[in-house]
Image (cartoon, coloured by chain):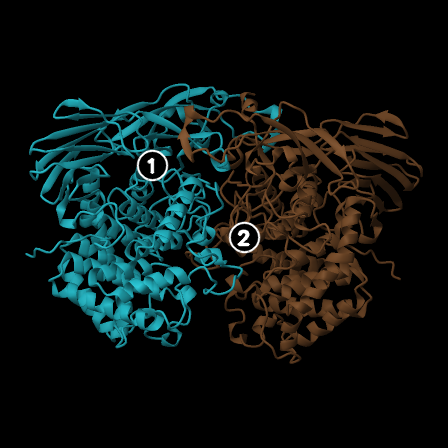
Chain colours: A brown, B cyan
Amino acid sequence: MTNRVHHGPTAPTSQAIAALRPLPADAVRLDREGLLGAWQDRNTAATLPHCVDQLDARGNLNNLRRVTGDYDGAFAGYWFADTDIYKTLEAAWWAGGFASFVAEIAHLLEKAQDADGYLMSYFQVEHRDRQWKELPSSHEMYSAGHLIQAGVAAARSAPDDPAAQQLLAVARHFADLLVERFSEGTEEALDGHPQVETALVELYRVTGHRPYLDLAARFIDLRGHGLLGPESRFHTRHYYQDHAPFRAADEVTGHAVRQVYLAAGAVDVAVETGDTELLLAAERLWESAIATKTYLTGGQGSRHRDEAFGDPYELPPDRAYAETCAAIGSFHWSWRLLLATGKVRYADEMERLLYNGIAASTSLDGTAFFYSNPLQVRTGHDGSDEDAPGQRLNWYSCACCPPNLARLMASLHTYAATGGPEGLQLHLYTAGTFSAGGRTVRIETAYPWDETVTVTVTETTAEPWTLALRVPNWCVDARLTLDGMPVPAAAHDGYVHLSRTWLPGDRVELVLAMPVRLVTAHPRVDAVRGTAAVTRGPVVYCLEHADMPDELDGFAFEDVELDSARPATVVHNRHSIAPVALHTPVRARDAAGDAPYQPLNAAAPPATLTATVPAIPYFLWANRAPGPMRVWIPLAPQVRQA
Amino acid sequence: MTNRVHHGPTAPTSQAIAALRPLPADAVRLDREGLLGAWQDRNTAATLPHCVDQLDARGNLNNLRRVTGDYDGAFAGYWFADTDIYKTLEAAWWAGGFASFVAEIAHLLEKAQDADGYLMSYFQVEHRDRQWKELPSSHEMYSAGHLIQAGVAAARSAPDDPAAQQLLAVARHFADLLVERFSEGTEEALDGHPQVETALVELYRVTGHRPYLDLAARFIDLRGHGLLGPESRFHTRHYYQDHAPFRAADEVTGHAVRQVYLAAGAVDVAVETGDTELLLAAERLWESAIATKTYLTGGQGSRHRDEAFGDPYELPPDRAYAETCAAIGSFHWSWRLLLATGKVRYADEMERLLYNGIAASTSLDGTAFFYSNPLQVRTGHDGSDEDAPGQRLNWYSCACCPPNLARLMASLHTYAATGGPEGLQLHLYTAGTFSAGGRTVRIETAYPWDETVTVTVTETTAEPWTLALRVPNWCVDARLTLDGMPVPAAAHDGYVHLSRTWLPGDRVELVLAMPVRLVTAHPRVDAVRGTAAVTRGPVVYCLEHADMPDELDGFAFEDVELDSARPATVVHNRHSIAPVALHTPVRARDAAGDAPYQPLNAAAPPATLTATVPAIPYFLWANRAPGPMRVWIPLAPQVRQA
């Protein structure tokens, strides 16, 4: 047992720009009765073991054993297949309890690592001559970054564990090679896929070794000057975010995962170097992304081609790419900005992502995953390749997303609250216990299904401190009681601040009213004009074919229209697939016979059949038989008069 | 001078299923005063010479010279770069007058051809060991097909020309190799890219050599059984149309160009083998494609990823791929079905394609081209790679489209009319002279700008015959006079049939009323809900940034809404970029400050600024400075009450 603080991911140094401070990982415990705790439990019990199994089954581990001479088969999977191992390993360290796995892998990695520190199995057998020669596509630094993050997780979670020390040493060895090859005064080069930036900053935080931070800062500033080579038919400079320096970019572009990973790394560099200009650039870019290039679910990336952001307001629900890894990267980006600035908007975005864009990617049982997360599926049968399935798959040839989910979920408890000498700030409401500096609160809530969040002080210090409670941006009616007495719930900058001398047993009840809200998109979002989405609290709902009632037999799913003149009702049913469903009035008209194009004045008659259909949380779709789904529902014509 | 009939492309044998017969190529002359004639002139004067130049500049010809030992540089461009040569060559033969070019190429091809007939330069120097081993992607038969079509064009256009004979011999030599390797009783194999099917049938038509037809029929029937290999992350069987036999397919899928080329080839096989089942399958598939997967412009292919068809009703205007080659292939498919069945719907589709999806691909000067043809461009600056430019480019690394346009335009005169002993059928109205069997008519018209088509009989036979005049599907008010006297214009199956004993000088005047028509899409086309398109006659119009009037300064292009309560006016101006513009009432409201998502009941106020903006023909967009454009215009809110 050590007295050291066990940090989670993202642990800014004491010198960093930081409005808020993360809680130590061991100062938080999520209860499995809460939704986030249940997800974290499922991750440990199902997702993470599944990932570990896949590393064997898909040949990722054998790729390393080829390097050590313990396997003589062919290389399996994509050239960056090692990163699936690293992300799973990182998840295992955050989760704890995978002792033999983490020890085996640390040993294997040490054995596979070259004397100079190089470690990427694809380039260590047949392709040694290609090392460092194809940086726009080789993912060598991207791979190093994930190795480093696994090492950081090990060092923070179990600093005294020999396997953790072994892994950290391997990671540092590779990081030192990067410093030797690419730091100031040596080669000017970039990896086509950002990731190493944030990893190097985290390694600096763990080790205090400044060259790691300097190299990360150098990578941020080298980008945007065409180092990644000329434009080609397939990849423009926008694809790599190499068209403009990060500080000058005014919109997110290109490959979405690369963009958000780059942005997260930029914030890490900014806060540790005190570079407020860079931090402001990251904030400006985030604002632009949220205003014009983000789905209602928080998903990002509108194009399958290039897995990329589109133009502003180009947000097709059916061809949304909205890659799971982009949502995770966006979550990391928002989290870093929340810590740096304390602005509630970043916590709002984390919540939206968590309950929608991220949660949707995992099946109920935790062992099947979406790679892309469309907001509409028509038939799903045409061209339903791996990136656009109507069903979650157990694994992918490019399996970046499942272990990325595993590492996020394994560390999920560290993102819910922050705290320091001034008190505790609660950002994401879920059942659990949260501590900072001798003050502990217990949260009881069935959020986001229920409106009520109860916070009980279970441990406190004698001096007064402030409990800050986030009022989500979707909430227009927040009510608060303190030990049963109403108190004003007026939020200051998005948080209600309760400052007092607390006593154990003090109890705060926050009620965040959750009426059904019909939402429309900005008029420039052409793809969903004339539609509305059904939401409640932070949760976006959808219609799914499996819920269509008998009276709609004979009508195509796509002919169902939202009848917003009649109110939807909230139905709680803990035993259903959806703990809360929204029974939504609709109309329908069989449009099968309509001409593809017709004169405006020959418009079809309004729908006459009326019915009520259950809308379920979007994140729970595709847990039954495959079929059509949609978030944005066409408004029945009478509504458009409004 | 020979007495032989000079056929154009697609010349069914006398045994073929054929409701209509094409006119010989030399029985038609388009006048440059008409739009189609002007395009054909521009093709000969600008596009075709430009293509010829590019073959030298881009290294296509040197690729062949590497094979003959006359060039020792590197291979240039895509592995199927020879096909750019073949399509240009085909165009040159149809156009006539490129004597030195066609002679030089015939000589070069003969010299480059292997002794066994093989000819594809990429696989004749370094990659000989890969010949025939990568058929799903090698394009070897696709390349052979274009060679064959060039040979057919030569043989039909100038059968006595030694260069034509030389080229035909080269093409036959390769075709004979295909027969030897792949005909019944030998290897079962397919090219991943259909094209050779239609070429082989045409070669059969020229030569009478039945094995060519049999091989084409075999390729049609082998497809759909998984011969092209397992599904992969990148290419499903749908991509290659290898998921279901052509006879059983109920919707167009996968790579759009491959699909429509396959369909055209299937019709060619069907009519020559008398296979009515196959013909019906092609008709059924065409109906399905037009009903659910075709843009208002006739463009096809909704996805950049895989250059593919999407799901039914998935027709995003901004991310329309609508490849130029797919529009050309669709035109070929419709033309073949028109000849086989005589049904007007196929001529309607040819017209729609010609004035919209195809015409838009070429710049006013004939030397710049679109590869994809979106119906909306927002900014065009993000990810504006070769496939999605906001501006036409002079050439492409994959330059399939420009020479494909050249060969279509060079043979354009052969698609306007058909005829035989029973008379003449006029399908596409343009100024020119059309003959069949001693009967000749001259058409004078400024169609599609003007409503009036004047047909004068200039030569006739003594016996009565029938002049059939198409009444386009967009026209609800057709009027007809015969020598100045009104006659009923009731169309039978889409054509007005005038049967009589004609005298030279007889004059028919057909007036096809062309009011401005606002058009809406099927309610299942989510991407353009709440919008309308402005059309007149066969021409689809668009709004382009360059035409926005001063009073809209300060408003974003995307905030302009169509005010359908006020009528649009037709403005003729022969000296303008658009001979006919439609002055269209609009409204505007600055939406820049609107939230990305907001409650339905907080919907923005209706636009208040009113203005009138010129809509120009879609096919003329992007001939000025790059910027936003859109075909589908949001309807101002008051309109939605209708």
Q: Which mark is residue B618?
A: 1
Element marked by disc 1: helix
**Left or right: B632 with respect to A607?**
left
Asked if disc 1 and disc 2 are in contact, CB closer than 8 Å, the reply is no
Label 2 belongs to which residue? A384
Q: Tally the marks.
A: 2
Residue placed most toward the observer, B435 or B512: B435
Residue A203 location, quadrant:
bottom right
Three-letter amino acid code at the position of disc 1: Tyr
Query: Which chain is home to disc 2?
Result: A
Q: CA distance from mark 1 to mark 2?
A: 32 Å
B519 relative to B339, above or below: above
Query: Which chain is home to disc 1?
Result: B
Q: Quadrant of the N terminus of chain B?
A: bottom left
Q: Is residue A188 visible?
A: no
User: In x, y percent, where is residue A541?
Assistant: 66, 37
- Of circles 1 and 2, the one toward us is 2
The 10 Å Cα crowd at callout 2, few under 14, some 14 to 19, many 20 or more, is some
User: In x, y percent, where is residue A39?
Assistant: 76, 49
Three-letter amino acid code at the position of disc 2: Ser
User: In x, y percent, where is residue A208?
Assistant: 72, 60
Element marked by disc 2: loop
B11 relative to B348, above or below: below
**Left or right: B614 with respect to B427?**
right
The 10 Å Cα crowd at callout 1, few under 14, some 14 to 19, many 20 or more, is many
